[in-house]
Image (cartoon, rainbow, N blue to C red):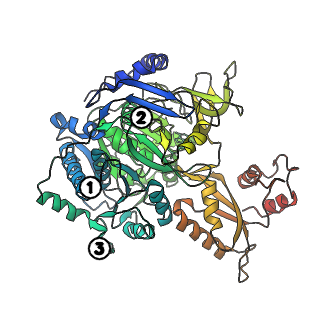
Amino acid sequence: MSYPYQIKTFEQYQADYKKSIENPEAFWSAIAENFTWRKKWDKTLEWNFTEPKIEWFKGGKLNITENCLDRHLEKMGNMPAIIWEPNDPEEHHRVLTYRKLYEKVCQFAHVLKTNGVQKGDRVCIYMGMIPELAIAVLACARIGAIHSVIFGGFSAQSIADRLEDAKASFVITCDGAFRGAKDIPLKSVIDDALIGNKTVKRVIVATRTRTPVSMIKGRDVWWEDEIKNVETLGLTDCPAEEMDAEDPLFILYTSGSTGKPKGVVHTCGGYMVYTNYSFVNVFQYQPGQIHFCTADIGWVTGHSYIVYGPLSAGATTLMFEGIPTWPDAGRFWEIVDKYKVNILYTAPTAIRSLMGFGLGPLAGKNLSSLQVLGTVGEPINEEAWHWYDENIGKKKCPIVDTWWQTETGGILISNLAGVTPSKPGWATLPLPGVQVTLVDENGKEIEQGDADIVSGNLCIKAPWPGILRTTYGDHERCRTNYFATYPGMYFTGDGAMRNKEGMYRITGRVDDVLNVSGHRIGTAEVENAINMHAGVVESAVVGYPHEVKGQGIYAFVIYQGSHGQDTHGTGDLVRKDITQTVTRIIGPIAKPDKIQFVSGLPKTRSGKIMRRILRKIAEGETDNLGDTTTLLDPGVVEEIKKGRL
Ligand code: 6R9
């Protein structure tokens, strides 16, 4: 494959950026020409950010899997598409060539069809990181079913909420998943999630861990049996469904500042073009290179940079089932060495956690294949950046700091590896087609003037092809969440700084969303879960700086337990109960790191919790709480300060 739209020099970046802003339609339609379309689009872009309504490649017909699979078969059928490294290093790895992956996707697409899945149906996928997960995703896309992948760490309750919101009629899962020393009973979690569910007709279960499962007659079938069945029927090639460019491709649930997670919807045409374009340019992918993105496919990073971006570019993508610290903290480096990985894309939290093990785990690992390093998910602190640069990249690999979101589909702000300048801690410049700006609280754009650095709320002024189109089943929520705060702009929820060169440094969320180990968690979600505990009267949750996770979760809880539990001294039992409740309702990723019992929360006279004060206390800045005179009971602040953990 060649990528005529791959930017090679800084000057070209500047020229392309200019072109993309002056005439976005001409710019993106020239890029879209490089893909396989059943029918070309009539209109490249139609949009307004008021409703909002965004349509890219309007009238175009395609199937994304023809771009990820079929078009590579003739010349690259024997090239590895997916290399899979199992959790247990002793187990044999698997390689799926483009030909093999194509066959497996077609076969499983037939399984979906024979089980009654139709175009437009929502299929929930809850699996571990095995090749069958990627196969399931692509098989859905092949027949036009809308996949919604749920990360294996979410609880039955979280899954139930998502199944209901998506009105999913099918579930694909595994008996269990291996993650480090753990064996997670996925099917059993699904069984719990399905209690009371009215929409799911069938559950397809792939075998992985041999954990005992209960298969419900008439509802549950084994993946392997179904494959045998389509083999017996002689079903091999499966023609791809013709999709409209604006037909939904997938739903991915993500946390916001209020309420339950929302289902971000991406569509076929724009998402394909944008993930491919950003993959090829940010990582400067060269044919034959091995790309290792360490994310889970349950997050957007896995969707865009393990599956769709790399495969649409004919790349070799490495998929890892396990975790960075098992069986020891040298696992990533062992994988890099074993497969001669060229591009490593991971999260700051993983880097910080591995830094903590020192250089021992690197001993004897040959990392000389590495050419490009990347980070994503949260701001990277300079110490971690330099450790990554010196010890992993040996100072010869550009590091791309890629800022983006579930809603953006692909990377929006990042340096391009070795092509545009990098700066530790800075995501740097927007990609072509991305019109970034900073605004103040009133939505007024901030001018740079003579200032070295300005800061504000990060917004985007015009659509790029990968932008979300709606939130599933609730378009109004999409409008109010992203397009109403600053009319005429997409508001990211992040704050950022900009320097004279026009580079951006993301400082973190400015709304009530936490970022724990690169995972987005809404404070309201955690509070609702804590409040489910019978003894809890009220709670407030804020983030605080955490050495490894980036942010930790600090909960202030008013507790009125029965049978005389002591919450003020050693209320550790109660803490454990509350933690268990959160794990049940959301999943282990949302567990509070600290729970402080309080007798009251700082509230305004109108009853609003003043989180600003709690945040400061959690951060340890107790001397500088600002104005507390508007509080209903200023005395409560003194008590909370004293009891700080
Ligand atoms: C891709 C992904 C999005 C939020 C985003 C921001 C934070 C992501 C970042 C970053 C600083 C980076 N974030 N990349 N912050 N520098 N390079 O992570 O999507 O899970 O939706 O999270 O993550 O706060 O708003 P998602």
Measured Cα–Cα span from mark 2 to mark 1: 43 Å
Mark sitting on residue 397 = 2
Q: Relative to 387, is 366 on the left or the right?
A: left
Let me know if residue 249 appears in the view.
yes
Tell me where residue 54 appears, x and y as whole percent.
47, 32
Which sits in the foreground, 611 or 163?
Answer: 163
SS class of the residue under badge 2?
Answer: loop
- Residue at mark 1: 112
Q: Amino acid at mark 3?
A: Lys
Which sits in the foreground, 460 or 218?
Answer: 218
Under 8 Å from ligand 1: the CB of mark 3?
A: no
Tell me where residue 379 appears, x and y as whole percent.
56, 41
In the rendered view, would you say 339 is above or below 111? above
Q: Based on the displayed image, in which of its 4 quarters is residue 409 positioned?
A: top left
Measured Cα–Cα span from mark 3 to mark 2: 54 Å
Q: Based on the displayed image, in which of its 4 quarters is residue 204 positioned?
A: bottom left
Q: Amino acid at mark 2?
A: Cys
Let me know if residue 182 appears in the view.
no
Say which residue appears at 40% left-offset and 18% top-offset.
26
Q: Amino acid at mark 1?
A: Leu
Q: Relative to 558, is 258 on the left or the right?
A: left
Mark 2 / mark 1, whichever is N-terminal: 1
SS class of the residue under badge 3?
Answer: loop
Measured Cα–Cα span from mark 3 to mark 1: 18 Å
Say which residue appears at 59% left-offset and 33% top-offset.
505
- Residue at mark 3: 217
Tell me where residue 468 appears, x and y as whole percent.
48, 39
